[in-house]
Image (spheres, coloured by chain):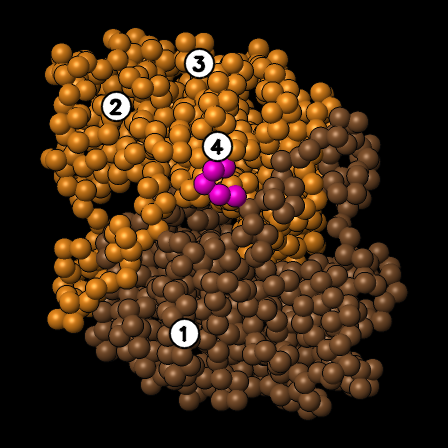
Chain colours: A orange, B brown
Amino acid sequence: MASLRSVSFYAASALKRHPQVVYSSTRSTLFKRNPFQSTRAMTTSAIPTERASEYDRVLRKHKGLNKDLQRMQYAVRGELVLRAQKLTRDLDAGAKLPFSSVTFCNIGNPQSVGQKPISFIRESLAAVVHPALLENDFLAPDVVDRARAFLGTCQSVGAYSESKGIDFVRNRVAKAIEERDGYPSDPESIFLGNGASDAVKAMLQIIIRDSTDGILIPIPQYPLYSATLTALAGQQVDYYLDEDNGWALSIDELKKSLYNAREEGIQVRAIVVINPGNPTGQVLSEENMREIVRFCEAEKLVIMADEVYQKNVYVESKPFISFKKVICDLKSPVELASFHSISKGVIGECGLRGGYVELFNTEQDLNDLVYKVFSVSLCSNVLGQYAIDLMMTPPKEGEESYSVYKRETDDIYNDLKAKAQKLCKGLNTLEGVSCNDSEGAMYLFPQIRLSKKAIETAKQRGYACADVLYCVELLEETGICVVPGSGFGQREGTYHFRTTFLPSREKIDGVVNSMRTFHDQFLRRYS
Amino acid sequence: MASLRSVSFYAASALKRHPQVVYSSTRSTLFKRNPFQSTRAMTTSAIPTERASEYDRVLRKHKGLNKDLQRMQYAVRGELVLRAQKLTRDLDAGAKLPFSSVTFCNIGNPQSVGQKPISFIRESLAAVVHPALLENDFLAPDVVDRARAFLGTCQSVGAYSESKGIDFVRNRVAKAIEERDGYPSDPESIFLGNGASDAVKAMLQIIIRDSTDGILIPIPQYPLYSATLTALAGQQVDYYLDEDNGWALSIDELKKSLYNAREEGIQVRAIVVINPGNPTGQVLSEENMREIVRFCEAEKLVIMADEVYQKNVYVESKPFISFKKVICDLKSPVELASFHSISKGVIGECGLRGGYVELFNTEQDLNDLVYKVFSVSLCSNVLGQYAIDLMMTPPKEGEESYSVYKRETDDIYNDLKAKAQKLCKGLNTLEGVSCNDSEGAMYLFPQIRLSKKAIETAKQRGYACADVLYCVELLEETGICVVPGSGFGQREGTYHFRTTFLPSREKIDGVVNSMRTFHDQFLRRYS
């Protein structure tokens, strides 16, 4: 639980510098011909005159830069990942390391680790990018028809669209949501962004009015929420997921967090629920969701439902159910913002940056304000918008693209499911490691028991948390890049890391083996 | 000049509701089957139970929403534009109006008004979107080679890239900048975003530490700056461009603004310079830029150089010169952030959302913070990134795509230049209208003299400024959508509007004629 006076431990620097590791910033070969000399604190891109060395710059660390942004932490792309990128470049340059390649398990970025794009998606995007393709017989007829319909409404993917996104896409997204939930969806309440992140940030910016406003967020959580709240100087109000109970969300825990925060003077305005969970991978049961909705209605909390993993559910007993549906079933007036993305699911089109928020039970004034916030960025990228349509309304049986689409997406889904089980099973065989099943999403979040010696060593090296030691040494010895649990939040005295299960099936075997060898050595080293 | 106590008049609501016009929000035909009833203040997307009508929502106007965002104005996509979109839909639905189509001159969005995309750009994008195209002979060899080189570094456009943008692109952007300026450019100081707007917002967020911090911005200005400053609760410090002198930037005026602001307790940290100007179209002379750099160095101001129109210069006597070059020529240590975009120039790929900022003379700490801010959004869209490369390093003589590229871009450039002159000439023939030449960019910003009666009428109708009356009636009577000068800022007691000159040459004739007829009627109506 955050208070107005203290910052919870994981919001502090998650990773201090490893004394033996130089995290130098990269310099391209191109820049070697820079005649300017750089000083220690300056970028190489600077003027080296005498005047420069005396010049007292405006944008200096600490007092010269926005303090909330300086406090902000974002572990998924933090220093450990920069180190992993450096190791990759070193390997490319012929360096001899204990491993032949870096395995990036730090981020849900399937196509960066070999997942193939879905043919239907890419053919459809090529068709609208380069309409000359529509004139020959290169593309399937359903791809061509859809592309023509889309171009008929937006004219060109090179034109700014409506700020909330192209009508064509929003109308069809609404229809797809209606089919998913069995309840109406209003295209005017749907806003398309460059990924779901854009929409999450806009909503948080609108909800946080001053530094006494707070948002309930799960611990562990996806650090977009903590980072954005820090940037906005809002209050992060933690509620802990129950690790011993498959990362379940307990209403008693929610109550405790909420009431404590209120006692501390925090005006708690909304709750973030990530379902399926990131980094935890749990899927909420319908009964649990009903409890949450009733709780939020009673306590006047807006629900921010991060549902970007809705297609990544691997257990038949817990199908994905949207918060929208539960709210409609209960006829609850609770305010909802539901987020979805093209980056996840089986299509995994992270690089295209497409996502949306659907608002429900909200006042028109709120929707108007969201529109205005979006309008200052003019619009999200139009190809990402089209990809949202392709995701939400995939080819139907009978359409020419259907069979290939079905086969490709089934293969990826089955593969993800198998890899989740394989890696989880492997992790649970390690001494002192326990890992809940991944019911959904793209991650495992194993708990690692660390010895007193490991904890002491981490402290001596200046790491904010002992799991950083584990992750740094894992990277340096095996090339496997995972993110310390402290980057997501965890109960004090527990240690975790988040790993994806996205590398290929064959590679997952190697990951398990490397992790086992490393883990045993680590235990011995710090016993 | 803004003060800490008052909001300058144009930051207030630029457009109040026209009493005869109902700015209803759109409802798609799809949504007609929504069984839920909407209440007045609610979106149609809501639960209509008794419980709902009693429910006191969290996200309500005024006290329930972030106040700075509520204060924020963004005229380029404001209510007048929503009205124009509504008129378009009405025409599509068969409504009888005094015009047959709406002419959108409100925004620099060339491909929305018929400008054709450049073949080279679109072939290149198609190649990386759908690499199967590389296998047949559909594409030019230089397009194929470049696509292969790009895909070799980013693997797939569906993968998140490095947060600051793909190495391949940043290295080549740096090289192109070096060729442009004759000075080195560091790829590590270049950050790619979803349009330049992303980068502008990130920089302002970093520079503004609290509500006593201010930024000098030109008046008139592009409202991204005023809107973002309002959202950040920072101080907007206005400096007026000299309309009588071709919108020149006077150092005396800068001094006056700066010293006044300091006297009011504002810590002025940076200056925004838009060159070529938006909405004014002026191009700064080299001597003027040198003065600005010397002034900023003496006064410790960071220069935020909005140089997105660097390829839109229509006068031979004033070629575009970058602030980077002037700073290097002067060996000045002044801190610089220079912005560029794929949305403008002759390619006009607005919908792809690509842009960059180059930092120069900045400390590494600042660059690290910019990286962190970008990393929370993971990365900008990868196709937009590739388009930046295509813009910065176009086909060279001897390459297969060169001749078509040259012809297409020359045609667009010559067309823009001719249309700028034609529209400007036309506007200057209207009674009481005076318009500076457009030396660059995509806009004209004519001054219109309004009668006492027009000003009174605007007041009676509740418009924040009389130019809103002019623009509303222009839209309703001719279908031409322009933006009131008050949306950009102007000297008190003067009235303007901003219009693009992007419609086709043939259409520009019609625009001039319609404007003349309307203008004469308007003068008579309010004489």
Residue type marked 4: Ile
Mark 2 belongs to which subunit?
A
- Which residue bears the numbered disc 4? A266
Residue type marked 3: Asp
Tell me the residue at 23%/69% (across/down).
B333
Residue A346 located left or right of residue B371: right
Q: Which sits earlier in the primary sequence, circle 3 or circle 4?
A: 3
Give a yes or no on whether discs 1 and 4 share a subunit: no
The mark found on residue A467 in the picture is 2
Residue type marked 2: Asp
- Which residue bears the numbered disc 3? A242
Residue B138: x percent and y percent?
Answer: 51, 55
Mark 3 belongs to which subunit?
A
- Which residue bears the numbered disc 1? B260
Residue A3 located left or right of residue A184: left
Range shown magenta: A209-213
Q: Which sits earlier in the primary sequence, circle 2 or circle 3?
A: 3
- For discs 2 and 3, the disc positioned in front in the rendered view: 3
Image vertical order of residue B133 relative to residue B42, above or below? below
The question of residue A211 being in magenta is answered with yes
Closer to the camera in the image, A379 or A128: A379
> Which secondary structure, mark 3?
loop
